[in-house]
Image (cartoon, rainbow, N blue to C red):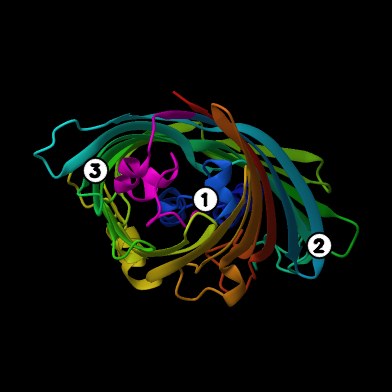
Amino acid sequence: MKKLFLAAMLFSITYMSNAQTLGYNDIGVLFSKETINGTARYNAMSGAFGALGGDLSAIETNPAGAAVFLNSEFAISLNFNNTDTNVNYYGNNEFSENDITNLSQVGGVFVFKSYSKNSDWGKVAIGFNYSIANDFETQWFANGNNNYPTWINDDNDETIQYLGSDGQYFENFSKGKNDKYTFTFASELDNKLYLGASFSTYDINNSQRVLLEEYNTDGNENYLDASLIQELHTYGEGFSFNFGVIAKATDDLRLGLAYQSPVWYNLSEDYLDSDLEIYYSNTDQLITDYSGYNAFDYRLKTPSKLTGSFAYIFDKKGLISIDYIYKNYSNIKLNMNGYNEFTEENKVFDTDLEAVGELRMGTEWRFDRFSVRGGYHFEKSPYKNALDSDAVEGFSLGAGFAFRGGKIDASYQKDNNTAPYNFYPQYENINAAELDIDTSKFTITLVLNI
């Protein structure tokens, strides 16, 4: 009988413990993404600022935009996020809601005007900005029945066979964020060309805890219950650089181009592979297995990013702006001190991911001291086999009021996308859970002239 229990436990460990937490390929994609998360004016126009500048979050898109500022200024932003997640697993829906508040942006730019009459170079700007490149806070649940048995005992031992599945329950909790610090230098040439360069550092911290529970019967009132807890904590630092240019083609038309290098991360992880419990009702026996925490260091290189921008300004009344961002996610690479520890994962990046584009569109109209804004954005999923609905699509709205010495802005963003999450990636005949994610964000920014 002990031999039977040991076989069952080993099978359950194998069946349940494969990558319920994010695998390295999913982490590579997650850490390569930067969301639209900046000042309220930037957010209200869906981040379409590559050819405009003049905003502290805009200089993260195109550092040449720092030289567009007329005067030195300081900005600080607070946002309120709401995420609604509906999870469908084998026809059963579970709804969860998550609310967080963040200091999402703070920074300043200092403008130094040139007093030389013999130089074509105009003002010089030096800027610093903190922002949240990505927020990992989420919590959701899945509940359903895939009708797949957890364990079948040896054919030579017909004591009990747990062939009936009574359902599965999965719980995911993630927290953390990717903090970005950007230092920018820019200058203006003949009031027609703006050039800029920036250097960014990243402080990334992501924790994930998952719980998987399974319930199985033998048809004779005996049951087997199993539960598995896994935890993954990934943290580290990274850096990137950015070059950009903005040109005034005419008094009203501006064109922008910016290149952001890959982000080079040095990452560490603490991983709890298995905290497993299996209970057999017929013997009233509880079997446990605890793997303990493992530590691991590695490196991640994200894809570079190229942003082309267009903006048309209607005198001082309003403007429209369009950005197109290109990223090739198949260029993500993992390595560990030069060793080929991630050969298979890097092959998956090459075969399963592709280059994608992100479209951002924004507009702003001014009425004396008041401004109204709107925007639209669309980002395709980098997975080749993704559904159309897996793309992130959303709109944004906002308004601002200028007062003596500064202004106050507010914005609202709404995004939606779907995403699969596979509890059992090693079994092709078990479906992934389907997540339908709605995200709302309200941002308020105070800007002060200095």
Residue 213 appears in the rendering: no
For label 3, the residue is 197
Furthest-front residue in this view: 117
Q: Return the x and y of residue 235 as percentages of the image width and height.
A: 42, 34
Q: Return the x and y of residue 117 as percentages of the image width and height.
A: 13, 36
Q: Say which amino acid is labelled 2.
A: Asn
For label 2, the residue is 93
- Distance from the alpha carbon under mark 3 to that under mark 2: 48 Å
Q: Residues within 10 Å of mark 1 (few under 14, many from 20)?
A: some
Q: Return the x and y of residue 119 as percentages of the image width and height.
A: 11, 40
Q: Which image quarter holds the C terminus?
A: top left
Magenta segment includes 367: no
Q: Say which amino acid is labelled 1.
A: Ile
Magenta segment includes 55: yes
Q: Which residues are magenta?
A: 47-74
Which of the 4 image quadrants contains residue 250? bottom left
For label 1, the residue is 36
